[in-house]
Image (tube, coloured by chain):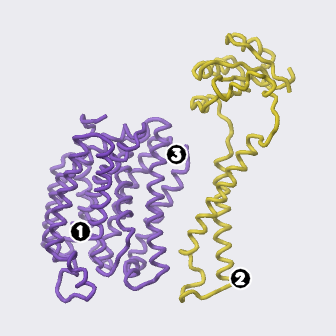
Chain colours: A purple, B yellow
Amino acid sequence: MKSPLWSLAVLLALAVLLFALDAHGFWLAWLVAWWLALGVSLGCLANLCLHDLTGGDWGWPLRPVWQAGVAQLGWIALAGLPLWWAVPDIFAWASPGSSPELARAHWWLNVGFFRARLLFDLLLWCLLGQWQRRTTGRARAGLILLLYGLSITAASFDWIASLQIQWYSTGLGLLVAIGQMLAGMAWAVTMAGGGSARLGRDHGNLLLMYTMSWAYLAFTQFLIIWAENLPDEISWYVPRLQWPWQGLAWLLLLGHFALPFALLLSRAFKQRIAALRALAGWLLLMHALDVLWLIWPSAQPQGQRLWMPLVLLLPMLTLWLTLALRRWPAREVTV
Amino acid sequence: MSGFGYLVGLHSADALVEAVKAAKAAGFVRIDTFTPQAIEELEELLPSPNRVPLLTLLGGIVGGAAGYLMQWYSATQAYAINVGGRPLHSWPSFIPITFETTVLGAALAAVVAFLWGSGLPRLHHPLFDIDAFALASSRRFFICIRAQDPKADQAQAWLQTLGQPVYEVKQ
């Protein structure tokens, strides 16, 4: 699978096959796979801007890897375009016979405006990637981070929260953004982490910070909604606390938080380059499951057709990795 | 010899690192350094047992377990109240306090372990008898060969080869 063409061919063949089998399941699975590829690239962009703002030795070996990730945004935008046709299919709010709450939200949640936002977001993310690549400066980095935060929050409400129309959580945008930045950091550390004892400690501590922030936000959202126990909000967790999703919850709790947390506390672990990189690769995998957790139970509460997103995630991730690895090591290191 | 050891002040971190390497090569084993800032190479050259991380971890575990048990005991045993029909042992609401007591236990253990490990609080130290030692907190990098070193009788002569005044530190 060295050549991206192979991954692309497998991905497209599987996409056509799934679409022929079950269009509804395919659109949702495509959303999961696309959201994962998009998230890793946007996470790279956000980490680049973070380093533009803070500076520091820890970032220099990682910058080319992030730039290779940001360079993927072009084809990811193309891969997002077909979702134009998915909107009436996967969202319950798009079909007639709506509730009074829905009528109030109609100005935001209608197919036309939704599609316009999709195009706007895809264009914005491509432009932000180009802007980061072509220019330098702290004000620009801050502005990109700001626009990223706003756009990903709106996109999370659109593509994740509105799958369950009655559900809302003001923390969702931040939770999604932290997950994406964690994925961007994990990808860079997998490729170029460690290098010296000091860099290993820095990279390990940053991964620790991301896993802790992610766990903090994910748990806070759960705790608040669980404590309130209000019908609209708890609807998000009712399917997620039952089989098979409870199994995924435990896997994320242990694999996305407890295990990396315990390992990254150890200085000796962080200074071992092979161990650190392996853990970063593991975190990237866990992020893929986190994306699945955010989307699939909302649309398929009993876990129907779970194989569909799993089958699409793998070639999508492979395509992303093979294309990004072709760009890295990149020459365009902006200092 | 009796007393604390022999002390020499050097003018740069690099000179100190070189001196420590040379002292180790010359067979000295009880070497101490005093510097105005942390020097990472010295940590590798002169590894010292540091129990602060382990004690911090233990303090965190004890603090977390105690915090959780406290809530479990008060909510299910001592003063059981039905809150909105939830189970008495509602673990999600115990997590924030457990987190806080974990941090508290770990922080207290870290401070106590640091003070205990470094022999603080202590009002006087033999090194303070050397006037020049005050520079260890601004611009001088000191190396000391302790009296307990098996080759301590050669320490004074060897330290003189560094080309700076050698101080004898009494107990």
Residue B117 lies, with reference to residue A313, above or below; the image says: above
- Using the image as rendered, state which of residue A22 and residue A124 is in the foreground: A124
Is disc 3 on the same chain as disc 1? yes
Residue at the image point whose x is 66% and y is 21% from the top: B24
Q: Amino acid at mark 1?
A: Ala
Dot 3 corresponds to which residue?
A: A269
* Dot 1 or dot 3, earlier in sequence: 1
* Residue A132: percent from left, percent from top: 25, 45
* Residue A243: percent from left, percent from top: 40, 78
Chain ID for label 3? Answer: A
Pointer 1 with pointer 3, Cβ within 8 A: no
Q: Amino acid at mark 3?
A: Phe
Circle 3 packing at 10 Å, graded few (<14), some (14-19), many (20+), is: some
Residue B85 lies, with reference to residue A126, above or below; the image says: below
* Residue A89: percent from left, percent from top: 17, 77
Q: CA distance from mark 1 to mark 3?
A: 36 Å
Is disc 3 on the same chain as disc 2? no
Q: CA distance from mark 1 to mark 2?
A: 50 Å
Tell me which corner region of the image, top left, top right, bottom left or bottom right, holds residue B87.
Answer: bottom right
Dot 2 corresponds to which residue?
A: B78
Q: CA distance from mark 2 to mark 3?
A: 43 Å
SS category of the residue bearing label 2: helix
Relative to residue B136, is residue A277 drawn left or right? left
Tell me which corner region of the image, top left, top right, bottom left or bottom right, holds residue A84.
Answer: bottom left
Dot 1 corresponds to which residue?
A: A29
Circle 2 packing at 10 Å, graded few (<14), some (14-19), many (20+), is: few
Residue A270 lies, with reference to residue B158, above or below; the image says: below
The residue sitting at the front extreme is A139
Chain ID for label 2? Answer: B
